[in-house]
Image (spheres, rainbow, N blue to C red):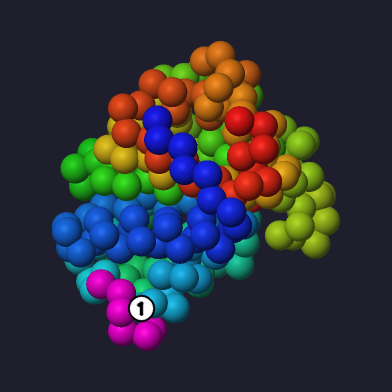
């Protein structure tokens, strides 16, 4: 695991954008794994800024897979992860919607959504570069503490801590869905390169546990220690516990 301490969140965004652009230049048909949450947003803004200024690569042949999705939101809800990724990144980069995949949270599709998503990922040849954030309780995607380390895409129940953390995106905590579809930890480990972004003091304890603590389902992000190619970009505040 390569841990890169950087001074500020802007530095994290710039280096993450460099990493993504370098891959897409080298492999125009790259498969990108995209995370939501607030941490990757400055990276996405930077990619969009460079694209609009004409310095970024073409994303026409890229395919994207999101990590997770809320269950129970009305279709098109602005806080669904499908809508968020389209708004913040893939639409501004000109990536066609049919090239952006996410787990299917529709009620009819739910029983088979996990298995179908695993098939889609496999059919695409797997993820080349997976962007990740980390939850304040050490979760990855929506794999909360206790998630099995080899898990695949499935339905999970959110902890109250995560619902409170994510309430800022909704009117109140009561509006945050209780259930989600998420890639499993085993799914995430199949990506060829994992790029974990961590910014702010609120991530310091979780990042230290993930990088230097024991491998345990109680800190799902500690599973990254098993992967041969992980890059962690952390600002000073998030790296404070390392
Ligand atoms: C969310 C997402 C994760 C994200 C994490 C941290 O619940 N499902 O993919 O990494 O929590 O979010 P943030 O970056 O907003 O702190």
From the top left corner, tell me how far across and down residue 91 is, in percent: 41, 74
Q: Is residue 21 above or below residue 153?
A: below
Name the dominant secondary structure of the magenta segment: loop
Left or right of residue 95: residue 236? right
Residue reaching furthest bottom? 53
From the top left corner, tell me how far across and down residue 216 is, in percent: 56, 15
Membership of 129 in magenta stretch: no
Q: Nearer the viewer, residue 51 or 1?
A: 1
Q: Is residue 95 above or below residue 234?
A: below
Residue 94 in sight from this viewpoint: no
What is the quadrant of the C terminus in the image? Answer: top right
Residue 43 in sight from this viewpoint: yes
Mark 1, residue position: 51
Label 1: how many residues lie within 10 Å, few (<14), some (14-19) or many (20+)? some
Q: Is residue 73 above or below residue 205?
A: below
Residue placed at 38% from the left, 84% from the top?
52
Residue placed at 41% from the left, 70% from the top?
47
From the top left corner, tell me how far across and down residue 230 is, in percent: 38, 35
Membership of 56 in magenta stretch: yes
Q: Nearer the viewer, residue 45 or 112?
A: 45
What is the span of residues highlighted in magenta in the rendered image?
52-57
Q: Is mark 1 within 8 Å of ligand 1?
A: no
Where residue 202 sits, quadrant-wise, is: top right
Element type where label 1 sits in the image:
helix
What is the quadrant of the N terminus in the image? Answer: top left
Q: Is residue 110 above or below residue 186?
A: below
Q: Across the whole image, how many numbered discs are drawn on residues?
A: 1
Q: Nearer the viewer, residue 209 or 93?
A: 209
Q: Nearer the viewer, residue 97 or 34?
A: 34
Residue placed at 62% from the left, 19% from the top?
218
Residue placed at 52% from the left, 60% from the top?
11
Left or right of residue 94: residue 220? right
């Amino acid at each position: 695991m390569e841990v890169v301490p950087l001074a500020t969140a802007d530095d994290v965004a710039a280096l993450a954008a460099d990493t993504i652009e370098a891959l897409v230049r080298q492999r125009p048909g790259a498969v990108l794994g995209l995370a939501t949450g607030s941490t990757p947003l400055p990276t996405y803004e930077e990619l969009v800024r460079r694209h609009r200024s004409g310095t970024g690569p073409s994303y026409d042949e890229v395919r994207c897979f999101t990590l997770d999705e809320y269950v129970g939101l009305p279709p098109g809800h602005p806080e669904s992860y499908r809508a968020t990724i389209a708004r913040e990144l893939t639409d501004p980069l000109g990536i066609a919607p049919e090239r952006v995949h996410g787990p299917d949270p529709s009620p009819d599709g739910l029983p088979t959504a996990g298995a179908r998503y695993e098939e889609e990922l496999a059919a695409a040849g797997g993820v080349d570069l997976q962007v990740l954030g980390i939850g304040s309780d050490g979760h990855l995607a929506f794999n909360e503490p206790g998630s099995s380390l080899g898990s695949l895409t499935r339905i999970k129940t959110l902890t109250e801590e995560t619902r409170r953390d994510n309430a800022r995106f909704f009117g109140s905590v009561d509006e945050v869905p209780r259930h989600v579809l998420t890639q499993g930890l085993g799914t995430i480990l199949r990506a060829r390169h994992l790029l974990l972004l961590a910014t702010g003091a609120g991530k310091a304890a979780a990042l230290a546990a993930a990088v230097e603590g024991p491998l345990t389902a109680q800190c799902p992000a500690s599973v990254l220690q098993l992967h041969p190619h992980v890059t962690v970009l952390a600002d000073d505040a998030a790296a404070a516990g390392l």
